[in-house]
Amino acid sequence: MALNCGQMTETRRPAPKPRSDATRARLLALLREGSWTVDDLAERLGVTDNAVRFHLDAFEHEGAARNEGVRRIGAVGKPASLYSLSPEGEAAFSRAYAPVLIACLEELRDRTSGPQVVAFLRRVGKRLARGFSHDAGPLSSRVNGASDMLNALGGLTSVEKSGGTYRIVGRACPLSRAVEADHCVCAAVTSLVAEVVGAEVKERCDRSGRPKCCFEISSDHRARTTAHG
């Protein structure tokens, strides 16, 4: 129904919900400092115990926080659980990894030849693979497992299939800053993927702009890698 110019209407807007982003950030900052009980955190943040537990549950699910023991207060009573930032959560705060990796590569480039750098990075990839489980199932399952592994490392990948060829295609790169500085870094990730997949892997990464991962798997033979140095 059309309204006359002089007609007024009252629009009722829902009351804004309190944002928890600030509490979340302050809670993470406290967890970086040491170990705390729920009561400790609630008192310092000025929120309820339930609010603290809500965020801690989320952090534990994300892998950013961990329960690392208990603190007994007094001779009687139930001990209180202690929470702190996990190593994974601590790593998320650091800005040093990329600069240190880039500096290491520059030092390596100054002291060794290009092929030696690539060979070294392939060995690094194989070493990294030791920290991940290797699926013994069909190739499709192993490729999906490699995609999940890259996503766990900070990538954004999915699997595509065309005929007998699989492609792990990324919308980003977990080592983008280092790859921008030195493309040979892709050799380490290619080797890592090959070890996990257990098949021939060819690196087809898009480095025309912001780096995007792309790995092609076309056989089920013993792992071999092809990466550009």
Image (cartoon, rainbow, N blue to C red):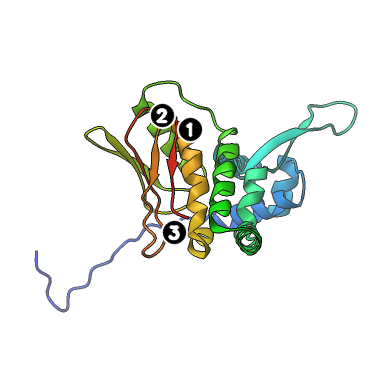
Give the label on residue 16, or none. Answer: 3
Instruction: Identify which amino acid the numbered label 2 is placed on.
Output: Arg
Give the label on residue 205, or none. Answer: none
Residue tagged by mark 2?
142
Q: Reply above or below: 74 against 37.
A: above
Instruction: Identify which amino acid the numbered label 3 is placed on.
Output: Pro
User: Image quadrant for the N terminus?
Assistant: bottom left
Mark 1 to mark 2: distance in Å?
7 Å
Q: Residue at x 57, y 53 (%)?
A: 117
Please tell me which residue lies in front, 8 or 61. Answer: 61
Residue tagged by mark 1?
196
| Whether label 2 touches label 3, CB < 8 Å | no
> Could you classify mark 2 by the number of other residues whose Cα lies within 10 Å: few (under 14), some (14-19), or many (20 or more)?
some
The x and y percentages for residue 89 are 63, 47
- Residue 86: image quadrant is top right
Mark 2 to mark 3: distance in Å?
47 Å
Q: Reply above or below: 120 against 194.
A: below
User: Of label 1 and label 2, which has the lower sequence position?
Assistant: 2
User: Of label 2 and label 3, which has the lower sequence position?
Assistant: 3
| Whether label 1 touches label 2, CB < 8 Å | yes
Q: Nearer the viewer, mark 1 or mark 3?
A: 1
- Residue 79: image quadrant is top right
